[in-house]
Image (cartoon, rainbow, N blue to C red):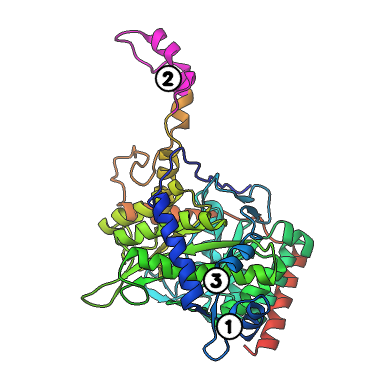
Amino acid sequence: MPRIEPIHTKYHLDVLTVEQLGAIKSATSHVMEQVGVQFPSERALRVFAEHGAQVDWNTQVVKLSPGLVLEALSHAPRSYVLSGRAGGTNLVLDGNASYFGTDGCGTRTVDFDTGLERRSCKDDVARMARVADHLSSVAFYWPMVSAQDYGRLAPLHELDASFNNTVKHVQTETVMGEGPARYAVRMAEVIAGDKERMRARPPLSVLICTIAPLGQDPEGIEAGMVYAEAGIPVGFMAMPNMGATAPASPGGALVVGSAEVVSALVLMQLVAPGAPVFFSLLGSVMDPRTAEYIVSIPQKYLCNVAAVQLAHAWGVPVLAGAYGMDAAEPASWQVGRDHVYTALMVPMAGAEIVTGGGMLKASTLLVPEQIIYDDEIYHTHRILLQGLDTTPDGLALDVIEAVGPRGHYLAQEHTRQHLRRIWLPELTHPRPRWDGQSLPDIRRRARDEFDRILAEHEPEPLEDAVKAELRAILDAAARELGA
């Protein structure tokens, strides 16, 4: 039985006032109406034109009136369910819980056996899916690295490795283009059982990145329309880089990124009214000294939390970003500092789904033990945000009276019950050894736990007939797409 322990927070964090939120929405509407967003897709341009948008066919820039935007988004569901393929894996996106997932899709990994850095492959995707299936901090799985041993078919093979190695919900950010998207839809139908069950409880969702500033990816948009029509939840992520692809201010970055995301969500509703969609925006900063990409910085944290408020103001769920910082090494001071902020702040803001766990070097490098560190950070935050228990059982007045002055609580049943409920962080507070040997360092302990999970955990397997159908879909894709 899979374990998923979402975060239910008793606290709420807003980084934008009502006035600031309104100002960003107003500026976003102005940009969509007066500046426009480029949609390099003939089908998308036709859809917009048919619904009264201003379309420049030469530049492929679309301008959207506020009325059209609001009418289209009025059809987008505020809440819906993402599902896995086993009981206990439903994720209800209604703002009452935050579900965290892994990060992806890196291109490099530290080899699980040799410790040397190399290109990633399909087996890495599969093995990380098994670990994610075990960890209760992981509610949904992004293929964490690319299946580079499968060339152009890598995204579909990443789905195959994921579905075969976790019963939890799978989200892809790499299956782009109309043709590959149709194969991904077919794979999701096979996992769900049929089209109707897939629509009701989709085992797959999709994230598509926009192109900053104020542009869309052609293959992403073509794929998005396929997913929307099929009923697969699809979201769009803007990644404005302050100073390079966005104004050098968090407010300006939020406006540019919101215009990219909202315009894409409008298209999905015009193509398939009522299609489940979600909003995502992750900011970053250009280092003015080197032009490098920086994500471990306060402006980014604020943008990620503000994006949660913006998504809800537009009336849709949000995929927020956490972890995934600049550090190149696990168990480092920088990871200890940077992985805490967004992983704590975005659930306090009410994010429905959150991605970012398990990766380093701005989400490009897989270091196996990092997911164990992030798991411990997650559970620390989960318990922090539960708050304090001030019920009669929590205040324990009867126990205090029974023990009285200068007594002790060791023999109390209340003590035995409550000590068993206390979560102990195993990495920082490991079980003591009684053989006189010193404990391995924390990185070795994290790696030992990772290896233990891989050796012992076996996810519920797919039925043989389902495996055969997935293989047949991959074979058909290889023939059609010329991989």
Q: Which residue is mark 1?
A: 55
- Give residue 157's position: percent from left, percent from top: 60, 75
The circle on residue 238 is none
- For badge 1, the amino acid type reads Val
Q: Rounded to the nearest whole Å, what is the CA distance between mark 1 and mark 3?
A: 13 Å
Question: Which element type, helix, strand or loop, lies under badge 1?
Answer: strand
- For badge 2, the amino acid type reads Leu
- For badge 3, the amino acid type reads Ser
Quadrant in the picture for the C terminus: bottom right
Determine crowd level at label 2: few under 14, some 14-19, many 20+ residues with C-alpha closer than 10 A: few
Q: Which residue is mark 2?
A: 395
Residue 105 in view (yes/no): no
- Give residue 407's position: percent from left, percent from top: 33, 10
Question: Which element type, helix, strand or loop, lies under badge 2?
Answer: helix
Closer to viewer: mark 2 or mark 3: 3
Q: Which residues are magenta?
A: 389-416
Q: Is residue 304 magenta?
A: no
Residue furthest left in the image: 289
